[in-house]
Image (cartoon, rainbow, N blue to C red):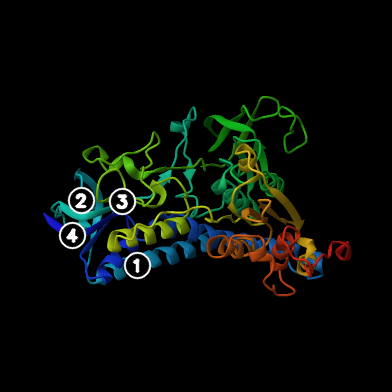
Amino acid sequence: MTEYDIVVIGGGSGSQVATAAADSGLEAAVIERGPLGGACITRGCVPSKALIHRADVAEELRRAPEIGLDAALEGVAYAEITSSIRDWVYERAARQERSLEEADGVALYRGEGRFVDERTLAVDSNGDETDGDVPDPIRGDHVVVAVGSRPLIPPIDGLGAVDFLTSDDALFLDERPDSIVIVGGGYIGAELGYFFGALGADVSLIGRSDVLVPREDGAISEFVTESLERYCDVYAGHEAAAVEAEDGGVVVTAERGENGDGEDESPDGEGRGESVDLEADRLLLATGRRPNTDTLDLEETGVETDGRGYVETDSILETACDGVWALGDVLGEQPFKHAADYEARVVAANVLEDAGHEVEYEAMPRAIFTSPQVASVGETEDELENADREYESTTVPFDVAPLGVVLEVDGFVKVLASPNGEILGCHVVGPQASILIQEVVVAMERGSGTVDDVAKPVHVHPALSEVVYAAFDELSSNRYSTAPDWRDVGG
């Protein structure tokens, strides 16, 4: 048995704990069966955003004649796009693997780890990558569980008899499907629906809730649902009840679920009834993800999981098993790469320095890269109402700022604050939303956390950040306001 100070299961964000340990003079090991960097680099946020960038450019070209520019989208070299992005991200993963292998104090085990007791792991080798040798068990004074997640496959009647895609393999198709049915109205479904639709596919998007991205503030969800209808036939309030293969493609039967209000119509303007059959070349399942904890033999440890397999930890990210920690998608709390990186910093400090840092998610931002973009931080209005919390709200459109008028864009900034000015939430939909939200995150995390922290600093003119400024100014204590309001000018 080989012993280490720290063993990390998972080569994504968790590997940062191993390299931090090595930098501190300790001996660390990382166990990973797939590409280094986790799902984000090769199967998630990085390649998907590279694809969505192409969709954004295509949309800009289509809009060019609206502003007097003679431009047109002549064609889409789809295979060239996907192959170049695939090569790029996998080379990035290979470089990360080489970097980890060359790091002093870090051993890389290529295979799948499973517990044989509380801090001892067997590594089921990938085979030829270790010349057929089966590594001896390894043990860590501390073990970090960071094995991530994989696509969740829902129980749909007939699914076993048809070919389908998940977000893991939909990113690198050699050909763009002429038509595709996407099951799932959350972040992944919305982003991929926009991508395929913007590049010319006929997209049918099925979501169980009566709006898309239902975790967002209600105003955001409604806006995204309406916006996505430009790229997809949206069947909100429906569930995929059955699928079958037909003529080289697939037919998906979507039935109205409990959230269907019985009043909406199909995209062609006709009443939907209780069910609709959707025909397409391909089927894509984007119904969420599940943690990869079922392969770890956690029953050999004291680590506890909930009914869905997510690891349970205390506020410093230690599990019920002494010396075993967890971070990333296996927690299920905040399924974002930036959240996993933050959790890795917390675990590193607590393991290496016994810092006792507790995780705080109140200022954890999130973004959806549709058109327009969405970004949020903090509470939604529904969450505040359900908690019976007192709050104030304001919403300003993008055309409050001169650049919003110049760019002729739709969108808004919504701010939720307590009566004493504490920022409770901010929700942005519009261009550059993922950037615009950041000053609010900083105010909540590093400032006093009040609307004045955003409203009082000087904002560049003319810039879209003036929309954020204007929204917070409406709830601020500023006696003399210089916030722009170009709504009448733009009209």
Q: Which mark is residue 96?
A: 1
In terms of sequence position, does the residue under pointer 3 or pointer 2 come before the other? 2
Q: Which mark is residue 236?
A: none
Q: Amino acid at mark 3?
A: Trp
In the rendered image, which residue does mark 2 sit on? 123
Image quadrant assignment for residue 235: top right
Labels 1, 3: front one: 3
- The answer to whether residue 482 is above or below residue 249 is below
* SS at mark 3 in the image: strand
Which quadrant of the rendered structure holds the C terminus?
A: bottom right
Q: Which mark is residue 325?
A: 3
User: Label 1 neighbourhood size at 10 Å, few (<14), some (14-19), many (20+)?
Assistant: some
Image quadrant assignment for residue 264: top right
Q: What x and y, as percent, mark residue 5?
A: 20, 60
Image quadrant assignment for residue 437: bottom right
Which quadrant of the rendered structure holds the N terminus?
A: bottom left
Q: What x and y, as percent, mark residue 9?
A: 28, 53
**Alpha carbons under labels 3 and 2: distance apart:** 19 Å
**Alpha carbons under labels 4 and 3: distance apart:** 15 Å
Labels 2, 4: front one: 4
Q: Amino acid at mark 2?
A: Val
Direction from residue 99 to residue 240 in the image, left or right: right
Direction from residue 33 to residue 62 in the image, left or right: right
In the rendered image, which residue does mark 4 sit on? 4
- The answer to whether residue 86 is above or below residue 287 is below
In terms of sequence position, does the residue under pointer 2 or pointer 1 come before the other? 1
